[in-house]
Amino acid sequence: MMTNTFKLGLLAAALGLLGALATPLTAHAEGKISIAQQFGIGYLVLHVVKDQQLIEKHAKAQGLDDIEVEWRTISGATAMNEALLAGAIDVVSAGVPPMLTVWDRTHGRQNVKAVASLGSLPNYLLSNRAEVKTLQDLSEKDRIAVPAAGVGFQSRTLQIETAKLYGNADFQRFDRISVSLPHPDATVALTKGGSEITAHFSSPPFQYQALESPNVHKLISSYDILGGQATFNVLYATEKFHDVNPKTYKAFYDALVEASQIIKADRAAAAETYIKVENSKLPLAFVKKIIEDPENDFTVSPQRTFIYAEKLHELGVLKNKASSWMDYFFEEAYANPGS
């Protein structure tokens, strides 16, 4: 027969177990976020978020006073996606096509979706060969530097244009002469010459730097291919991170919105922030010129992303067909216009 003391002990243990089971997992998961970005002014929104500690600010508004924010830099969409799916990073950043690829592959499982746009900025395909005037002039003599050959933003954008020119069956025509190389290294190779790199599908600020060389010229812009101003980079995460960390996620999204507003309110200050956070050696006036370029819009609203979703599905790159941009963005983004 159990004693009262033993019964009370069992009851206490049972209540403790029930209490542990009843405690939401979010209590343990909330308050930590790791973010990975790549190189360039395309990540200016994140630079401002980091510099002004906007996640920490908005976390306090959510009742999270001691949020832990980890920042990482990774080159290339492939490495980004691997880190996200391995659980090594909570939020990663890359171009729209790599995000759509992982959205497609995780559909019904991890359900990766986009958080927000990091802005609409054109990417220029550049060449240092005078005889190459158009995309059609590229040949086996050329090597095109891109951050993630065949799968990154630049390669997928080039594939869309290639399909227009040569038909859907030949959309990967230029993949065989593409080389994976980070933008900083590709810029040096293109401007100095003497290497196998004769073309570079670049991004800001690197394309601006390269075009200062008399030996470098532009062949085509991503805006030309997509028909106007279009999102360059996006942030994306798994459904689990979004759902299990509602306060942390909201703090992050609100921080992105505020950073975009800060940039638009004072672009000169944003240029100073970029140089400070990136520890860049670029002249302030040069960076300010880029940020003030009307082609560049540091908005969290997605623009023309659905063109990628439609065309990449048509080309067989994506198995799942999206009905609108909202299919691959988390609902917090719906508060802003999108396409």
Image (cartoon, grey):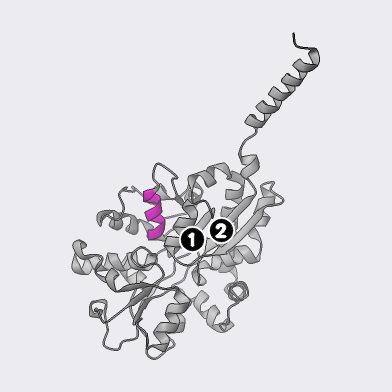
State yes or no: residue 250 in magenta: no
Q: Secondary structure at mark 2?
A: strand
- Measuring from the top left, give residue 155's x and y in whole percent: 34, 67
- Which is nearer the eye, 92 or 273? 92
Identity of the residue drawn at 29% across and 74% down: 177
Identity of the residue drawn at 80% across and 16% down: 5
Q: Is residue 183 above or below residue 73?
A: below
Disc 1 marks a residue whose amino acid type is Ser
Residue 338 occupies quadrant: bottom left
Identity of the residue drawn at 34% across and 48% down: 322
- Measuring from the top left, give residue 89's x and y in whole percent: 54, 55
- Measuring from the top left, give residue 253's x and y in whole percent: 56, 53
Residue 158 occupies quadrant: bottom left
> Residue 93 got which mark?
1
Query: How busy is the neighbourhood of tag 1: few (under 14 within 10 Å), some, or many (20 plus)?
Result: many
Q: Which image quarter is the N terminus in?
A: top right
Q: Which residue is mark 2?
A: 35
Residue 209 left/right relative to 251: left
Q: Secondary structure at mark 1?
A: strand
Identity of the residue drawn at 43% across and 65% down: 232
Disc 2 marks a residue whose amino acid type is Ile
Q: Earlier in the sequence, mark 2 or mark 1?
A: 2
Residue 334 left/right relative to 199: right
Residue 312 occupies quadrant: bottom left
> Residue 112 got which mark?
none
Q: Which image quarter is the C terminus in?
A: bottom left
- Which is nearer the eye, 249 or 296? 249
- Measuring from the top left, give residue 8's x and y in whole percent: 77, 18
Q: Which residues are magenta?
A: 97-105
Give the CA distance from mark 2 to mark 1: 8 Å
Magenta segment, principal secondary structure? helix
